[in-house]
């Protein structure tokens, strides 16, 4: 069995594509039941974030696994595979580990070093585990990815400036609204992106600030830290009518702010000047219907607009990315070594059992002669037989381990299995 990762990310896909493929909380149970029915798969994990939708699987072969995962991804999301053939990518075996470890470390995100991704990788793994979709291989892969992400943040400064996307969005809003000082803002959501947004808004001199969220308690906790007014989603329309800027970042499975709500907000108490409204949509799937721009005075920016504004790292940031890549390489080597050891373990165990079988058979054949020896002499003969078998097997086992460590052990492992009459296929 082998590891295969298949997915779509912000690098080659628009936010519209990502939101059509994205999974939301109440869809995972059904998705994992679908995956369990796929013959080429024995394990699976779905990773769905703002930047990517990926499915990792332990598969019988690359081709069969690729077709199965591709069919699952598009059938589960009810989209046409041909429509998304261009942005689709895959990673196999060691490349899959390297890609996932880079994702968990924050160097494959739109915003380098984003803080949310490591928690999202961890959450994806625990959800798959709870659904009974993981086994030894993907559990080890995702635990290694989480360890890599932790090391990257502990040993480098990769996470020192993770809020470039929010910064770009608030800067865009500031230009569109001719400054934010004294303006009124509404933040929809109370997660990590919402927290970053409130910080940037306060830094830019925002006046009234309100936070609404499905969980009023979470909105209250964020509001207490930022001097804002909390509320539930039932006051969204009224709060939007008071706002110059709306920043939305929720995990809602569908549109939260549509044209009708925006039209009402623009007509409700905005004064004779009908001051403009700027909506900054940081969610995937999108919270804001793009057609709200049909309403006079309304402007919208989403992830697609912002990702072109985010400056890719340079200078010191590039040095930190290079450090993280070094950590990723170390952890990939560590994971690969574990994989090879696991793949060889049945062969090594079978070799030792064959040696023990021969030793036992030959000692039994000498039973009458051994019976004439003292107990100490019999023990010495048995120990001698054990040592001879161990020494004969030592070099072949060491050689196959060394060959496996350098990536070329399968041929030697097959030869050993054939020579000793052992039924074994490396990689199973």
Image (cartoon, rainbow, N blue to C red):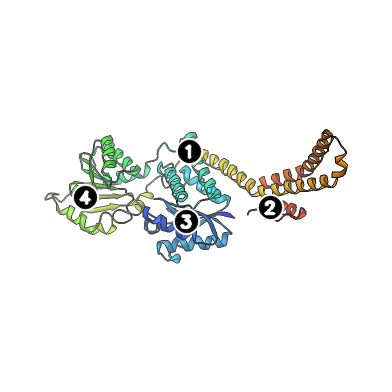
Quote the CA–CA distance across marks 4 and 1: 38 Å
Determine whether the residue tagged by mark 1 lies in a helix, strand or loop: helix
Determine whether the residue tagged by mark 4 lies in a helix, strand or loop: helix
- Screen quadrant of the C terminus: bottom right
Give the residue at mark 3.
Answer: 7
Number of the front mark, 4 or 1: 4
Foreground: 175 or 203? 203
Quote the CA–CA distance across marks 2 and 3: 29 Å
- Ranked by sequence position, the earlier of labels 4 and 3 is 3
Residue 260's spot in the image, x, y percent? 21, 58
Give the residue at mark 4.
Answer: 234
Q: How would you rate the neighbour count of disc 2 (Cα within 10 Å): few for under 14, some for 14-19, many for 20 or more?
A: some
Query: In the visual, does 277 lie left or right of 91?
Result: left
Which residue is rendered at x = 50% and y = 34% of the image? Answer: 155
- Screen quadrant of the N terminus: bottom right
Q: Is residue 6 visible?
A: yes
Q: How would you rate the neighbour count of disc 3 (Cα within 10 Å): few for under 14, some for 14-19, many for 20 or more?
A: many
Determine whether the residue tagged by mark 2 lies in a helix, strand or loop: helix
Residue 358's spot in the image, x, y percent? 79, 48
Query: In the visual, does 241 lie left or right of 379?
Result: left
- Ranked by sequence position, the earlier of labels 2 and 3 is 3
Residue 347's spot in the image, x, y percent? 69, 50
Q: Is residue 407 visible?
A: no
Q: How would you rate the neighbour count of disc 1 (Cα within 10 Å): few for under 14, some for 14-19, many for 20 or more?
A: some
Number of the front mark, 4 or 3: 4
Number of numbered markers: 4
Give the residue at mark 1.
Answer: 150
Quote the CA–CA distance across marks 3 and 1: 24 Å
- Ranked by sequence position, the earlier of labels 1 and 2 is 1
- Ranked by sequence position, the earlier of labels 4 and 1 is 1
Number of the front mark, 2 or 3: 2
Give the residue at mark 2.
Answer: 410
């Amino acid at each position: 069995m082998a590891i295969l990762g298949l997915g779509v990310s912000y690098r080659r896909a628009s936010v519209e594509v990502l939101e059509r493929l994205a999974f939301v909380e109440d869809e995972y149970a059904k998705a994992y039941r679908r995956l369990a029915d796929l013959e080429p798969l024995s394990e699976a994990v779905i990773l769905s974030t703002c930047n990517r939708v990926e499915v990792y699987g332990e598969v019988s072969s690359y081709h069969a696994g690729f077709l199965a995962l591709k069919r699952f991804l598009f059938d589960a999301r009810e989209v046409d595979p041909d429509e998304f053939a261009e942005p689709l990518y895959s990673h196999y075996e060691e490349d899959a580990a390297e890609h996932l470890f880079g994702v968990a470390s924050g160097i494959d995100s739109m915003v380098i070093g984003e803080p949310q991704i490591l928690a999202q990788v961890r959450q994806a793994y625990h959800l798959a585990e709870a659904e009974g979709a993981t086994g030894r291989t993907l559990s080890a892969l995702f635990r290694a990815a989480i360890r890599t992400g932790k090391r990257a943040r502990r040993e480098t400064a990769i996470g020192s400036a993770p809020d470039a996307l929010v910064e770009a969005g608030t800067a865009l809003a500031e230009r569109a609204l001719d400054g934010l000082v004294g303006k009124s803002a509404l933040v929809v959501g109370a997660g990590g992106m919402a927290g970053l947004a409130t910080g940037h808004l306060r830094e830019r001199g925002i006046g009234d600030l309100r936070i609404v969220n499905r969980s009023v308690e979470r909105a209250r906790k964020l509001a207490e830290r930022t001097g804002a007014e909390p509320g539930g989603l039932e006051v969204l329309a009224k709060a939007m009518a008071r706002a110059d800027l709306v920043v939305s970042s929720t995990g809602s499975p569908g549109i939260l702010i549509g044209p009708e709500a925006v039209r009402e907000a623009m007509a409700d108490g905005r004064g004779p000047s009908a001051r403009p409204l700027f909506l900054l949509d940081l969610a995937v799937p999108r919270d804001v219907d793009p057609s709200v721009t049909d309403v006079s005075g309304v402007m919208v920016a989403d992830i697609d607009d912002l990702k072109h504004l985010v400056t890719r790292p340079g200078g010191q940031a590039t040095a930190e990315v290079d450090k993280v890549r070094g950590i990723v390489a170390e952890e990939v080597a560590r994971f690969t070594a574990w994989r090879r050891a696991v793949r060889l373990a049945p062969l090594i165990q079978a070799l030792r059992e064959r040696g023990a079988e021969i030793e036992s058979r030959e000692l039994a054949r000498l039973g009458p002669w051994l019976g004439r020896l003292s107990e100490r002499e019999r023990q010495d003969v048995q120990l001698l037989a054990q040592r001879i078998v161990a020494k004969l097997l030592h070099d072949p086992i060491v050689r196959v381990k060394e060959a496996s460590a350098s990536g070329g052990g399968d041929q030697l492992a097959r030869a050993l299995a054939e020579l000793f009459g052992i039924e074994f296929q490396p990689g199973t």
